[in-house]
Amino acid sequence: MALLPLNEALSNMLAQLPQPTETETLSLNNCTNRVLAQDIISPINVPSFDNSAMDGYAIKFADLEKFTAFNIAGKSFAGKPFEGETQAGECVRIMTGAMIPTGCDAVIMQEETEQAGENQIRFTNEIKLGQNIRRVGEDVAKGNLVLAKGSLLNVASLPLLASLGIAEVEVFKRTKVAILSTGDELVSVGKLLAAGQIYDTNRFAVRLMLEKLNCEILDFGILPDDPKIFEETFMKAQQAADVLITSGGVSVGEADFTKDVLEKLGEIAFWKIAMKPGKPFAFGFLGNEGEKQTIFFGLPGNPVSALVTFYQLVQPALSQLAGLNADYLANLMPKMTACAATNLKKAVGRQDFQRGFYFINEQGELMVKPVGQQGSHIFSAFYESNCFIVLEAERGNVQVGEKVTIQPFNGLLK
Ligand code: AMP
Ligand code: MG
């Protein structure tokens, strides 16, 4: 079977995923990292009144023609406006954020004033009409679209909603994801290893990434390589979850047996993707059309392959399922061009995702070097790397100084 290019596998998969429909209304305090299911239109102007950008004095600009010194008529504080109106030749002491008194149309900062007499000041610098005034609606105008459906609610967006006085929002429900590892050799952390056994790394890694993606996690543990147990557990997961993510059992040898079980329960495609690490990958649906369907992702068993396929394939899929908008999805895994700081080993045939470290050299150029050993069983290199070096399938060895594509790790791996 010919190897499937990664971008074909990805677009094929994304095209088959349903749009999220179920929503819930949550208070602003409880929706961090959730995805908006509605457009947010501003109910107010921000700021809602003209206010001062400086600590200083508010005047009527036209008075400058007749007066060189101004009497201080009163004070305007943030939250405690000056009541009344100034007379000709009067100014108001004003603080940052305080309401501009009626009729005033310029604010002179404190540092550009000097005492003229008792309760009287004069101005030392040139003054422009309207200076140092923040206008109504300058930040957000009432009726404008503030955040579109599909926006991520985070530190950059939630305070904006708070500034509009919005107390609750409609968001998409979190995706329920069941996880499990397969393999007779696997043992959970906290237990002793017998001969031939290894610790289950993948379920732990997948859980961490699902937490970052704000999914609801249902942990189905470790399954021994037994078709009957696979079938029972997959059926339970299908009932309980929107998505099932497994690892192991999709490579040559075991694949046939996993395949048999999955064929009974739904429609799953077993792909051999032209990527390294991470060749075997399974995608499809548990459950037949018309009944409840659960999306299935079968990751390869090697921990590095499992993590890389999760990052490159499952991350975009779960982000789309979460309801994130097209702009967000297009920028999920941005790429850049860097200069190879060393030679890189690369075999022609598959797209490589080498673990790399990018940095700026003394000349200010973006450079990248590979980190540690690149084998798909070597997990330790991840910790020291900060990007994937993405080498095209048809490319061979890379010489020092050649341009290469890098993909800096996004928040999922940091
Ligand atoms: P498999 O795809 O099941 O043939 O697994 C490929 C390799 O990955 C084997 O060396 C497995 O022991 C190893 N492996 C599979 N699952 C895990 C796991 N959850 N954690 C760590 N290693 C695993
Ligand atoms: Mg296995």
Image (tube, rainbow, N blue to C red):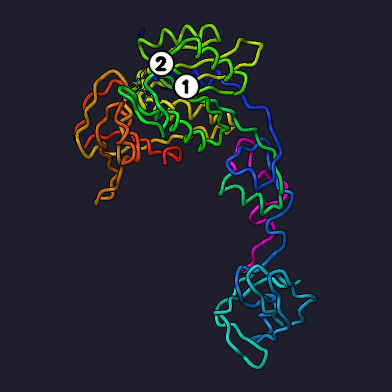
Residue type, numbered disc 1 = Thr
Task: Give the position of the N terminus as an image quadrant.
Answer: top left
Instruction: For residue 78, say whether it is visible.
Output: yes
Instruction: For residue 130, say whether it is visible.
Output: no
Q: Is 157 on the left or on the right of 411, as rendered? A: right
Q: For the residue with label 2, is its CB less than 8 Å from the closest atom of ligand 1? A: yes
Residue type, numbered disc 2 = Gly
Residue 70 location in percent, x, y?
Answer: 67, 85
Residue 158 location in percent, x, y?
Answer: 61, 48
- In terms of image quadrants, where is residue 354? top left
Q: Which residues are magenta?
A: 132-153
Label 1, on which residue? 246
Residue 67 location in percent, x, y?
Answer: 67, 85
211 vs 290: above or below: below
Ligand 1 visible in quadrant: top left
281 vs 177: above or below: above
- Residue 133 highlighted magenta (yes or no): yes
* Residue shown at the point (30%, 45%) measured from the top left: 359
- In terms of image quadrants, where is residue 342? top left
Secondary-structure class at tag 2 = loop
Label 2, on which residue? 249
> Dot 1: few (<14), some (14–19), or many (≥20) neighbours within 10 Å?
many
* Residue shown at the point (65%, 78%) measured from the top left: 57
